[in-house]
Image (cartoon, coloured by chain):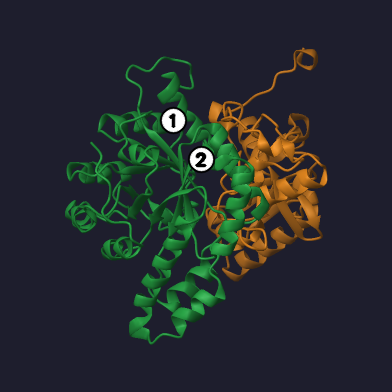
Chain colours: A orange, B green
Amino acid sequence: MIMGQQKPIQVVLEMLAPYQKIVLVGCHGCVTVCRAGGQKEVEILASAIRLAREAEARPIEIREVTLERQCDPEYLEVMRPYLDDYQAVLSIACGAGVQFIAEKFSTTIVMPGLDTTFIGVTEKQGVWAERCQACGDCVLHLTGGICPVARCSKSLFNGPCGGTTVDGRCEVSKEIPCGWMLIIERLRSLNMLANYRKILPMKGWKTSRDGGPRKIVREDLSQ
Amino acid sequence: MKTESRLEHILDAGQFAVTTECGPPRGAEPGVIRKKGELLKGFVDAINVTDNQTSVVRMSSIASCVILKEMGFDPIVQMVTRDRNRIALQSDILGAAALGMNNILCLSGDHQTFGDDPEAKNVFDLDSIQLIQLVKRMRDEGSFPSGKKIEGSPRMFIGAAENPFAEPLDIRPLRLAKKVDAGVDFIQTQCIYNLDRFEKFMDEVRNLGLHKEVKILAGVTPLKSAGMAKFMKKNVAGMDIPDAVIKRLADAPKEEQSAVGIEVCVESIRRLRQVEGVAGVHVMAIEWEQKVPEIVEKAGLLPRPQVV
């Protein structure tokens, strides 16, 4: 899923300073699962904003909404009838959701309440970690199902570098397991260490963001 | 002979090579490099100049190497993939060769979070093994990765680093084998303090026959004090300093510890010289370049061979 993390409340309050009447919109998609931008977070954030503004004697009116998904046009349309009654929208979906609101409602001011962080997994309750950088050219079949782009701090294709610690951590931080240590252990356990002996050639990054903003058109579906 | 490299000539003649490294200044003063060069003249076969080591900004390796070249050295340009994409790498390889550089050390580079600019965007378009492939292709095939022909290919002796002490230990010889496959000519290792462990690494290197395909220069760094040894052991990933070495330093009075550090370094070189497959030594005296002549002399490595 796409992970997000709420911006500090002070940052949000600064963004909202010029406004007295806003829509706070959450999303039932990824950010609900990672507990950053779902219905519950909309409620909590709205209360926090109201309280802070009341304390400043500058009350704010907030309409609380949570859409099925902010990245699908049909769900965004739900907001169209009432958006003109508000000065601005604060979205706590990922960056795609925020931008799609801006794109679909050309006269509406929209602000991000979240920082979109990464594509990741729930390692355990309350712990999420990055797994994919969406490079557009998957090599997981060669690396034991562990991604060198996302899991190695240097995105090396022929690691590990000399910075692996005694307990298999990355030199960048004790919190980061060495991605190449994981790849090698996994290849070993699968009896596929021969994969490691082959040099992975320089990667084409064109399919990644380096080729410019990406787009997929499926002729069979887009008619 | 693939290149005009003095190091290649010495290694090719089967002579035990001595290289050292010099960290460039954090400023634009060329005199700093010249001063280090003066200290080393006649004592080493080649000098590496580091490329923004530990991600701390310094004078560029190529520029510093040009200064050393003017002094009569045949320096080794270090090049990391951290800060350059393949376009910049190719361009710098051509530029370095045009300025008379005959040696290049291909590295990925320390992660930028270690330095003064942890907010920098990193590049890592290639890794060190792919950089070896790139230089080799440019040199031997006379072509860019795009397939386009190079007019005047860079004749560079290709080096890389290897750390026999980083986990996973049993993978390190295999990784060296990949560098050999990629076309590396010489290797300079991480500093060796655990000689038993290094000898095990070399056993495996010989089992794989790699010592016949690549010239391995064993890395050594003199320790200035027990404090430095403890600091390096604790803070530098992949640095294996046995407790016995630290104890030997710590047992000496403080003012004598640096002399003991030199002694340990000299003994290491003498022992490394006996290891089959070790073709030379790489003395990395970090901001202690003035001690290199003493180390080289005490290790019995003088005079350095003349290359015509």
Vertically, is A92 above or below B285? above
Figure quadrant of the N terminus of chain B: top left
Give the residue type at disc 2: Ser
Vertically, is B30 above or below B226? above
Question: Residue placed at 42% from the left, 29% from the top?
Answer: B87
Q: Position of residue B194 (x, y in %)?
A: 55, 65
- Label 2 belongs to which residue? B128
- Horizontal side of residue B261 vs B44, given as left or right: right
Question: Residue placed at 38% from the left, 49% from the top?
Answer: B16
- Label 1 belongs to which residue? B135
| Foreground residue among B81 and A60 | B81
Q: CA distance from mark 2 to mark 1?
A: 11 Å
For the residues labelled 2 and 1, say whether their Cβ atoms are less than 8 Å apart.
no
Q: Position of residue A110 (x, y in %)?
A: 60, 43
- Horizontal side of residue B76 vs A79, given as left or right: left
Q: Quadrant of residue B234?
A: bottom right
Q: Position of residue A70 (x, y in %)?
A: 73, 38
| Foreground residue among A136 and A19 | A136
In primary-sequence order, the first of circles 2 and 1 is 2
- Check if mark 2 and mark 1 are on a common chain: yes
Secondary element at image label 1: helix
